[in-house]
Amino acid sequence: PLAEFDLRDISYHVRSPTSHELELPSGSGSAGSAGSAGSAGSAGSGTVALRFPEEREAQQWWTVLSSSLREARRGGAGTRG
């Protein structure tokens, strides 16, 4: 992987019905390949914009991601290990 982040540290924001954002923690991702992930910790690169062709597809992604984030936060560090 280019970078790995703890799911509990990621924020998911709905900006419009077809535009969502993932906010990644700055500098806390562990790079699998430092050369490939060189911009991962720089200012402004902690946000990933997701644009969907249809509102329905965006809603499906929101359901999956928000559920996963909620579970990760609820489970804490003691999940699977």
Image: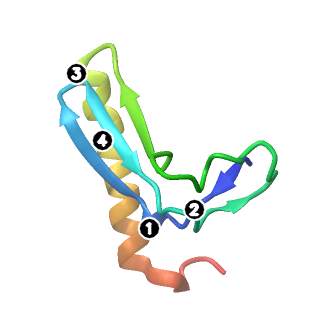
Give the mark nearest the N terminus, 1 or 4.
1
> Could you tell me the amino acid type at mark 3?
Glu
Q: Is residue 13 above or below residue 80?
A: above
Contact flag, marks 1 and 2 (Cβ < 8 Å): yes
Mark 3 secondary-structure assignment: helix
Give the mark nearest the N terminus, 4 or 2.
2
Q: Give residue 81's position: percent from left, percent from top.
A: 66, 81
What residue does disc 1 label?
9
Give the mark nearest the N terminus, 3 or 2.
2
What residue does disc 2 label?
5
The numbered dot on residue 55 is 3
Q: Give residue 37's position: percent from left, percent from top.
A: 71, 47
**Cα separation between marks 4 and 2:** 18 Å
Contact flag, marks 4 and 2 (Cβ < 8 Å): no
Give the mark nearest the N terminus, 4 or 3.
3
Q: Is residue 75 above or below residue 40?
A: below
**Cα separation between marks 4 and 3:** 10 Å
Give the mark nearest the N terminus, 3 or 1.
1
Q: Nearer the viewer, residue 36 or 77?
A: 36
Q: 63 left or right of 49?
A: left
Q: Quadrant of residue 20?
A: top left
> Could you tell me the amino acid type at mark 4?
Trp
**Cα separation between marks 3 and 2:** 27 Å
Contact flag, marks 4 and 3 (Cβ < 8 Å): no
